[in-house]
Amino acid sequence: MSDFLDRIRGALVGLKMPRALEALDHTLQQLEKGEITAIEAIDTLLSEEYATRETRRIDVALRTAKLLPAKTLEGFDFSFQPSLDRERIAALAQLDFIRRAEVVHFLGPPGTGKSHLATALGVAAVKAGKSVYRATLADLITALSQAEREGRLAEKIRFYARASLLIVDEIGYLPITTGGANLFFQLVNARYEKGAMILTSNRGFAEWGEVFGDPVVATALLDRLLHHAVVIQIEGASYRLRGHADLIPEHVRANAPIAPPPPPKRRGRPPKTKNGVADL
């Protein structure tokens, strides 16, 4: 019996299964007492090891994805933002939008939960085994600008295009130069119809010409970012300032609606008509 145990312990060490090795003695005691069957003993050892490895994988992936501190949908106060359709957010958490390489837009005033929801969906994607990366728009453009100066722009764009889901946070909070807008367009173009994105912004699409400092680049961005898109508009007060609303000036509290522009016009020749009716 001792020879068998020595071989089992040696195998667990060789296979780098420290959690299963740690649980081995207790599991064998349960087996000897008849509390579990042999199959259940094997299941226990493998489950313990798998759970430990999965926890470690998720922790590393969250750090790599820049998703810490992690957020969850369970931790979001939907009662504070009644304008949100909870079922629609739950549907996004199924992650089909990643498979379809769609772009999810969260629009709304500061403090309404846009970043929380974006991060929570990113955490859900990591747990599902998807590769995710999150950055603010300002940090993203800073990194791309540095890569361009160092002659590594194509390599950097490939790095950002590699993730199954790219989360770009805080669009509209800081001004973007025309050069920065062009760099962001190159990244968006590289991911277009290939990788999913989540964008958060406190500015309406009609203001993107001002945000990016170039209406032409803004139009080109929206042409790609709205082609396969899900737009979630959040109308409500700041969750962070919920206890201090009386300290905020009235003109600041008043939030203009953030609505998407009409869809871009179809390119190419107009559809053929028959008797004045379009043949669709």
Image (cartoon, rainbow, N blue to C red):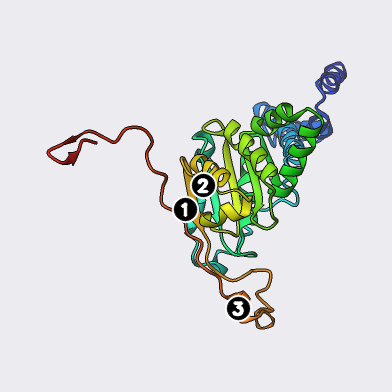
Identify the residue at horizontal 65%, vertical 79% (top origin).
Answer: 245
Structural distance between the alpha carbons of marks 1 and 3: 31 Å
* Residue 12 located left or right of residue 254: right
Within-10-Å neighbours for mark 1: few <14, some 14–19, many 20+: few
- The residue type indicated by label 1 comes to Arg
Tell me where residue 128 appears, x and y as whole percent. Answer: 61, 37
| Residue 92 badge | 2
Is 140 or 264 nearer to us in this picture? 264
- Say whether disc 1 or disc 3 marks the residue closer to the N-terminus: 1
* Residue 59 located left or right of residue 169: right
Structural distance between the alpha carbons of marks 3 and 2: 34 Å
Tell me where residue 93 appears, x and y as whole percent. Answer: 54, 46
Kindly state the secondary structure of the residue where label 3 is placed. Answer: helix
Q: Is residue 129 visible?
A: no
Tell me if residue 156 comes above or below residue 225 in the rendering. Answer: above
- The residue type indicated by label 3 comes to His
Q: Which residue is mark 1?
A: 88
- Say whether disc 3 or disc 2 marks the residue closer to the N-terminus: 2
Tell me if residue 236 comes above or below residue 73 in the rendering. Answer: below
Tell me where residue 126 appears, x and y as whole percent. Answer: 66, 39
- The residue type indicated by label 2 comes to Leu
Q: Quadrant of the C terminus?
A: top left
